[in-house]
Amino acid sequence: MSDIDYNSLDLSFIQVSFDDGILVIVNKVNARNTFVASLIPELVQALEYADKDDRVRVVIFTADHTAPAYCSGANLSDAWHWNGIDPDTIADHDYRDAAGQVSLAVLRCRKITIAAINGNAVGAGATALQLPFDFRVAWGGAKIAFPFASRAVSPEGATSFLLPRLLGYSAATALLLSGQIFLPTHPLLNRLYFTILPKREDVLPAALTFARELASSTSAPSIVATKALLLHAPSSAEDAHIIESYLFKKMITGNRHDLVEGTQSFKERRSAVFTDTVDHMKEWAPWWTSLNEAPRAAKL
């Protein structure tokens, strides 16, 4: 696709900047960065642009480190009306929760994604804005909570799928049913984070340093293939063997610069310069059947 001028995007709830292969999205909804309805289309749009933009290698989502929260969850000042749920016009099976829309947008992004959690994260701040990301870098003092049971609602953001896969059934049960506040260093949570830092102002710089390392040392098609295998995990060892064999054959027999460069740079003991794009995966994937989660059109 043609190059996008991220500085010219008409955005009110996020700030987007691009430099040297890294797209940084900053949450700037309000003082506590509540999860408001108007945030969702802007964030989804930015992720879709990043997915299609060959210049983007890594996406980072964060908040200004001076804000009191990374994301404090839903704004409950108007109860749950901000969700736009009208029982008279939206059928039960046609409603799609806002956090889930963000989670799916993150998961569908074929670039490496990093959540830089530099403040308290509650509700959607702990689910959609953390769980679907490939890496999570966190401030050790951030308060993390999944308070759904304490607010008389059920989990959202594809949490029931993501949290047990990331931390195990037992930890997911404890986190979701208790609704208690935990720090990233707590035994129930610490495996969720790639790095935990003592100072909140160091979180984004650390994420940027890591992002640059990833952008310069990984091949885009390999990232796409690996992410797809993990997200759409085969149901048995035999299925995994068949699908992995299929992908591996495609990757070592295709006319790809990165394949040659990866081998040559290893032989020459130098850093690789990868140039292949995610488009190299178009004819190889998907091998899975995608569920159409879009609401059904209203009957006239």
Image: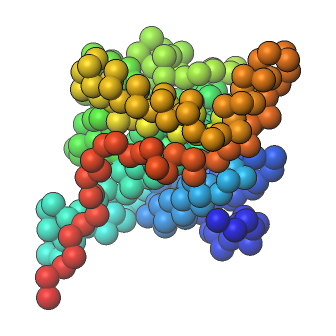
Q: Where is residue 13 in the image (x, y as percent from the top left)?
A: 60, 63
Q: Which of 185 and 263 is in front in this view?
A: 263
Residue placed at 55% from the left, 33% from the top? Answer: 253
The quarter in which the N terminus is drawn is: bottom right
Give above or below for 129 relative to 101: above
Q: Position of residue 28 (x, y in %)?
A: 64, 56
Q: Nearer the viewer, residue 297 or 36?
A: 297
Q: Is residue 173 left or right of residue 145?
A: left
Give above or below for 75 relative to 272: below
Is residue 59 at all visible to an observer of this figure?
A: no
Q: Is residue 189 left or right of residue 270?
A: left
Q: Which residue lies furthest to the top in this view?
A: 187
Q: Position of residue 270 (x, y in %)?
A: 85, 21
The number of callouts visible is 0
Is residue 19 at all visible to an observer of this figure?
A: yes
Q: Nearer the viewer, residue 111 or 28?
A: 111
Q: Where is residue 224 in the image (x, y as percent from the top left)?
A: 53, 39
